[in-house]
Amino acid sequence: MTGSGEDWLSDGLNVTGADSGLWVSGVDYIAGWREARVAADRLNRALLSVGFELSAVRAVASTNEDGRGVVRLAGWPATVDRLAQLLEARSDGDGGAA
């Protein structure tokens, strides 16, 4: 992923959850994580393209307990609020995208 260098994952935003240490033997977490990584990278490129810094908000690939890919959004509250405002401005007013 491009962005603010290779250190963008360790810039102070804690993206690990309380359940980050739970692993079940026999579950293919890698396949789910790879799928989530593709989606997270796409979202991160979109965030960069509209002027967000990945050190302030970013999508992070993960998996759930079943090994299914999950993309989590991690960011500073003010930056996430700015993203929400951008998405709301793009909304058609009925809860859907324009």
Image: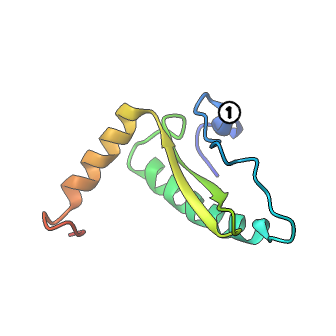
Of residue 16 and residue 87, the one placed in the foreground of this image is: 16
Corner quadrant of residue 16: top right
Residue 31 image position (x, y, % from top left): 75, 71
Residue 39 image position (x, y, % from top left): 56, 65
Q: Is residue 98 above or below residue 46?
A: below
Residue 19 image position (x, y, % from top left): 67, 48
Q: Amino acid at mark 1?
A: Ser
User: Tag 1: Cα neighbours inside 10 Å, few (<14), some, or many (≥20)?
Assistant: few
In-image side of 97 versus 46 (left or right) = left
In-image side of 24 versus 49 (left or right) = right
> Going 48% across and 38% down the picture, which residue do you hit?
75
Corner quadrant of residue 29: bottom right
Q: Which residue is mark 1?
A: 10
Task: Residue lying at the far left in this picture: please name it.
Answer: 93
Quarter of the C terminus within the rendering = bottom left
Residue 83 image position (x, y, % from top left): 34, 46
Corner quadrant of residue 65: bottom right
> Going 39% across and 34% down the picture, which residue do you hit?
77
> Going 70% across and 64% down the picture, which residue do you hit?
33
Task: Residue lying at the far right in this picture: please name it.
Answer: 25
By what rule are the colours in the image chosen? rainbow
In-image side of 67 versus 83 (left or right) = right
Of residue 20 and residue 91, the one placed in the foreground of this image is: 20
Q: Is residue 27 above or below residue 70?
A: below
